[in-house]
Image: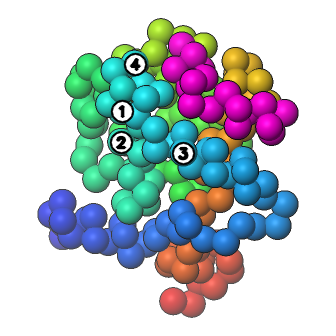
Amino acid sequence: RILDAAAARDAAKALVRIDADGPLHEGEDPRLVELGRRMFLDERLSQNGAVACTSCHVLDAGGSLDVPLPNVGVNHERAPYNSAAIWDAPRMFRFGWKGDTDFAGIVERALTRPYLMGNETMHDAAARATPYYADDFARLGLHIDKRDDFVKPLAAYIAHIEPSGADADRYFDGNDNE
């Protein structure tokens, strides 16, 4: 049986419901999570100021898009891969459709690919972020111009936005009877 796009979207929403505003987990730094949330939603980090992480990782759709090979990046070029869902990112140790990078690497790809956020380098994205986030980074003891520090808030936010009460969440918790 073939599902139409609306039915597939509804099925995905039933499988994975992301709780982006849920309570903090033990050990989470609320300042780091909040900075990551703001960065995740911020279109100013893209080359043209029109694309944010959430342009491709729609939280209401499990952290992905419900269209194949989207063209939502800065130059509206069709991406060679579908945007991966981020709801299970904290459980992953390799990223990318080929499994060939770590979290910092996948963020760098998103920030620098022309069919995504379009910056020439990750430093360009950091320069765009500096007027808005430099004080927040400094208060956290992070350096906005260092690759690993730049991705820490995003990693903290993505780790925070885990599934909440969805079918997949119950399965991962060991309940396979439903």
Q: Earlier in the sequence, mark 4 or mark 3?
A: 3
Residue ID at (72%, 47%) = 32
Q: Position of residue 23 (x, y in %)?
A: 67, 72
Q: Earlier in the sequence, mark 1 or mark 3?
A: 3
Please give left or right for residue 82 compared with residue 72 in the image: right
Residue at mark 2: 55
Q: Are marks 1 and 4 in contact (CB under 8 Å)?
A: no
Q: Secondary structure beneath disc 3? A: helix
**Is residue 15 shown above or below 103?**
below
Mark 1: which amino acid? Answer: Val
Residue at mark 3: 38
Between residues 22 and 7, which one lies in front from this camera angle?
Answer: 22
* Dominant secondary-structure state across the stretch colored magenta: helix
Residue ID at (52%, 51%) = 86
Residue at mark 4: 47
Magenta stretch in the rendered image: 124-141
Q: Earlier in the sequence, mark 2 or mark 4?
A: 4
Q: Give the spatial CA distance, label 1 vs label 2.
A: 6 Å
Residue 92 seen by the camera: no
